[in-house]
Structures are given as structure tokens and as C-alpha cells.
Amino acid sequence: YEFNYVTTGSASSPVDFVLTNAGNKAATGCGFPVISDTTNFTIVGDTCGTSSLNAGASCTVQLQANPATIGLKQATLSR
């Protein structure tokens, strides 16, 4: 996802990222969602937590871009 231009020192609007278990069995032993760059991105909402995710089920993590410096920023969201 591209947040486009976000002014240094400010924050973007929150964006929903939907995580879906496309498998046929529950995903168990899940950890809290984490973002690889906590300097420039913030998790502001989370319906996933550490709950198992049943087959075909989804949960949502909301992220905000809040760049500390000028330039392209990249991060990975994982759970």
C-alpha cells in the first residue's frame, strides 16, 4: 500500500489492512500484529490480537504513516 505524501512530523489517515485465513484450518498460536518500522508507522487499531483465526475468517489491523524524516519509507506488517 502507498500512503502517498505525508508531511514529516504529521500522520496520515488510518488505513485498514485485512488479514484473511484463506486456508481450510484455523490459524492458531498467533502473535500480536507487529510492524517492522515503528519509527515511521504506527498500529492504531487491531481486531486480530492473539486470537486464532478460523478458516475463511478475517481480522483488521489499522496503520498510520507518521514519517520522522523525509524520504521513502517501507515496512512489513506481520502476525
Image (tube, rainbow, N blue to C red):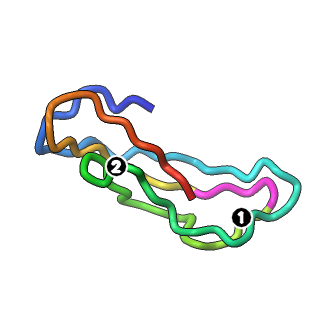
Q: Is residue 57 magenta?
A: yes
- Under circle 2, the secondary element is loop
Q: Quadrant of the N terminus?
A: top left
Q: Name the mark on residue 37.
A: 2
Label 1 amino acid?
Leu
Query: Which quarter of the picture shows residue 30?
Result: bottom right
Going by the picture, which residue comes out furthest to the front? 36
Image x and y of residue 17, in percent: 51, 46
Most foreground residue, 43 or 15 = 43
Query: Taking 17 as reference, is 4 above or below it?
Result: above
What residue is drawn where x is 75% and y is 63%? 27
What residue is drawn where x is 37% and y is 36%? 74
Which residue, given by chain and number where applicable, does mark 1 sit on?
53
Query: Taking 77 as reference, is 45 above or below it?
Result: below
Q: Quadrant of the C terminus?
A: bottom right
Query: Taking 63 as reference, is 33 above or below it?
Result: below
Image x and y of residue 6, in percent: 21, 33
Q: Of callouts 2 and 1, which one flags the residue occurring earlier in the amino acid sequence? A: 2
What residue is drawn where x is 53% and y is 65%? 47
Q: Is residue 76 magenta?
A: no
Label 2 amino acid?
Asp
Gap in Å between the C-alphas at discs 2 and 1? Answer: 25 Å
- Under circle 1, the secondary element is loop
Q: Is residue 72 left or right of residue 76?
A: left
Q: Is residue 32 left or right of residue 5?
A: right
Q: Which residues are magenta?
A: 55-59
Query: Which quarter of the picture shows residue 43?
Result: bottom left
What residue is drawn where x is 80% and y is 64%? 26
Image x and y of residue 36, in percent: 40, 51
Query: Taking 26 as reference, is 77 above or below it?
Result: above
Q: How many tags in the picture?
A: 2
